[in-house]
């Protein structure tokens, strides 16, 4: 591939990442969160209940920072702490998915609609290329994240 193509793709990737951050910050603010809290709430939505330790490992936050995060979510009634049935010392963070979606879905609706229109404008072959690029990019980012977090 030509160096010019690589440069353009790199610039578009950077622009996409920066613009995505700006949009998510705006959505977070509209929902009453910081951008990072909003994204960490997304982890709970995506993965479901987990312990504070698991959330700490996933996010890279200290356990103290995770406690503050959970407190903020709990104050907004978006999660609850639930003791383990077999071991009362183990505490799970349980997201209220319905309440979270009621809060966030309207803020994402325009983006989802416009993204669906954009996707519909591509041929099936083009969609497969976009899917391949995005899924492979995600795998690269996961690999690099894991490597950096293991140091």
Image: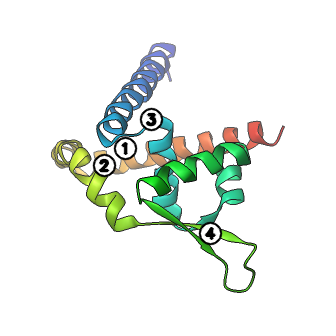
> Where the C terminus falls, by quadrant?
top right
Q: Secondary structure at mark 3?
A: loop
- Measured Cα–Cα span from mark 2 to mark 1: 5 Å
- Whichever of labels 1 and 3 marks the residue nearer the N terminus, that label is 3
Q: In the image, is 72 to the left or to the right of 100?
A: right
Marks 1 and 4: CB-CB under 8 Å?
A: no
Q: In the image, is 31 to the left or to the right of 55?
A: left
Marks 2 and 1: CB-CB under 8 Å?
A: yes
Which residue is painted at 62% across and 69% down in the image? 92
- Measured Cα–Cα span from mark 1 to mark 3: 30 Å
- Whichever of labels 1 and 4 marks the residue nearer the N terminus, that label is 4
Q: Where residue 38 appears, x then y in whole percent?
A: 44, 43
For label 3, the residue is 34
For label 2, the residue is 127
The disc label shown at residue 24, or none: none
The disc label shown at residue 92, or none: 4
- Measured Cα–Cα span from mark 3 to mark 4: 23 Å
Judge by depth and name the residue closer to the eye, 106 or 79. Answer: 79
Q: Secondary structure at mark 1?
A: helix
């Amino acid at each position: 591939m030509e160096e010019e193509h690589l440069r353009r793709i790199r610039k578009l990737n950077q622009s996409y990442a920066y613009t995505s951050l700006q949009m998510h910050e705006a959505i977070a603010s509209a929902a009453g969160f910081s951008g990072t809290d909003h994204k960490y709430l997304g982890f709970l939505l995506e993965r479901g209940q987990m312990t504070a330790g698991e959330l700490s490992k996933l996010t890279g936050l200290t356990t103290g920072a995770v406690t503050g995060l959970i407190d903020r979510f709990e104050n907004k009634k978006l999660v609850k702490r639930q003791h383990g049935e077999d071991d009362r010392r183990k505490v799970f963070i349980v997201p209220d998915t319905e309440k979270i979606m009621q809060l966030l879905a309207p803020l994402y609706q325009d983006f989802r609609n416009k993204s669906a229109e954009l996707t519909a404008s591509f041929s099936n072959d083009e969609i497969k290329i976009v899917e391949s690029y995005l899924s492979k990019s995600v795998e690269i980012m996961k690999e690099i994240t894991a490597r950096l977090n293991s140091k």
